[in-house]
């Protein structure tokens, strides 16, 4: 064998060893990462399926839908219900809602309309045929009556609900290692165990823990329910933004556990899984916040938030257009509930003004 041939073979052998080193140091770790991510994704998938199945609780609320929606192809609506419930507040089925949000999801546009309904809104409660604060609907008839009340108010079908307590809210944020939001002013607020002035926040953009975010979401000492609703929307957007970020992938297991321990919903795992396209839209996801304007009102010495007819009509039309364009009206009309006579609140007729005042502080 000539020296030239030996040299060629030696070069080929070196190239093979180099390729093997490249495979060993680059390709092999990449394969391990991919396999690990796949295994983790499978674990998360199974965990999510188990949690959602345990949280599944269908309701028998009346609906205006002629056919059941299919989230894989239809626009849908979800009612987010936050209940005023903690270890210190165990009212059973008579729990009032502390937060009500309606989200409409448009599949074609990959957009979400998010509406906060002020909890003191003076509305008609269908089953009782009275007008009172909307947060009393849950105390009267649970999730079912809350759904029916919101459907009547906004004149849209509510397809799904997600009901969560304070702990779900806090645990999800803590599982994400906090969220970044702007605190509008200095806040001194009670914590989830109702200890006064336990949470103190300074103004400005900052990362908040679950307890701190809850204090921001609940406070309204320096403004009103409308601003409170805007803060809750801001927090919701921050949670979504953090949850869909790549850096939060490893935290999804804890997020799922936090939700599962403190949530009930009528969405099946398959239906929830069909919403993945909204999550993968990332920063391209269009989320618009809506507000119901109104004014302070005292009726029979009790405080209510009187919704503005024009604002309500505009919001109704926006949500209808987002859900089902053919249903939206170009003209505004008064809600049927505006024609209802005001009757006494049976459930809280014995409540004193001071009780309503103390609840307003929460």
Image (cartoon, rainbow, N blue to C red):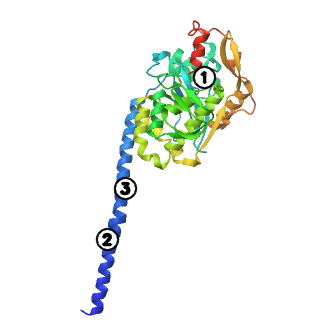
Nearer-N-terminus badge (3/2): 2
Quadrant assignment, res 297: top right
Q: Residue under circle 2?
A: 20
Q: Which residue, given by chain and number where applicable, does mark 3 sit on?
A: 33
Mark 1 closeness class: few <14, some 14–19, many ≥20 residues within 10 Å: many
Spatial separation of the CA atoms under disc 1 and disc 2: 66 Å
The residue pinned by badge 1 equals: 119
- Closer to the chain start, of discs 3 and 1, is 3
- Does the rendering let one see residue 333? no
Give how far across and how far down residue 279 sits, in percent: 51, 44
Comparing 308 with 214, the one in front is 214
**Residue at 57 percent of width and 6 percent of height:** 350
Where residue 238 sits in the image (x, y, percent)?
55, 40
- In the picture, the disc for residue 27 is none
Examine the rendered structure and indicate whether residue 326 appears above or below residue 58. below
Q: Give the answer, above or below, for where 42 lies relative to 147.
A: below
Q: Residue furthest left?
A: 1
Image x and y of residue 164, in percent:
48, 28
Q: Quadrant of the N terminus?
A: bottom left
Q: Nearer the viewer, residue 67 or 355?
A: 355
User: At which x and y percent is residue 307?
Assistant: 69, 23
The residue furthest bottom is 2
């Amino acid at each position: 064998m000539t020296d030239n041939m030996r040299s060629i073979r030696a070069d080929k052998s070196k190239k093979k060893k180099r390729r093997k080193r490249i495979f060993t140091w680059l390709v092999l770790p990449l394969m391990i990462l991919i396999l690990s991510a796949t295994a983790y994704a499978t674990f998360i998938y199974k965990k999510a399926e188990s949690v959602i199945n345990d949280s599944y609780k269908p309701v028998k609320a009346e609906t205006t839908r002629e056919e059941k929606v299919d989230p894989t192809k239809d626009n849908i609506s979800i009612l987010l219900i936050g209940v005023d419930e903690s270890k210190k507040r165990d009212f059973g089925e008579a729990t009032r809602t502390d937060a009500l949000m309606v989200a409409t999801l448009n599949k074609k546009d990959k957009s979400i309309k998010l509406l906060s309904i002020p909890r003191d809104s003076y509305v008609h409660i269908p089953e009782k045929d009275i007008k009172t604060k909307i947060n009393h609907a849950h105390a009267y008839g649970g999730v079912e009556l809350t759904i029916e009340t919101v459907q009547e108010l906004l004149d849209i079908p509510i397809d799904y609900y997600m009901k969560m307590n304070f702990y779900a809210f806090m645990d999800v944020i803590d599982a994400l290692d906090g969220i970044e939001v702007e605190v509008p002013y200095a806040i001194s607020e009670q914590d989830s165990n109702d200890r006064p002035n336990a949470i103190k926040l300074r103004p400005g953009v900052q990362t908040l823990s679950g307890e701190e975010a809850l204090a921001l979401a609940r406070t309204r000492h320096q403004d009103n329910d409308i601003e409170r609703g805007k803060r809750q929307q801001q927090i919701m957007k921050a949670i979504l933004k953090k949850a869909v970020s790549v850096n939060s992938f490893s935290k999804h297991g804890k997020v799922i556990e936090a939700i599962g321990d403190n949530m009930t919903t009528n969405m099946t795992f398959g239906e929830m899984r069909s919403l993945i396209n909204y999550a993968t839209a990332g920063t391209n996801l269009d989320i618009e916040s809506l507000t119901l304007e109104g004014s302070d009102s005292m009726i029979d010495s009790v405080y209510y938030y009187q919704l503005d007819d024009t604002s309500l009509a505009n919001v109704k039309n926006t949500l209808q257009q987002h859900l089902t364009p053919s249903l939206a009206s170009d003209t505004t009309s008064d809600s049927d509930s505006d024609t209802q006579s005001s009757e006494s609140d049976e459930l809280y007729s014995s409540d004193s003004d001071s009780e309503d005042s103390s609840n307003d502080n929460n």
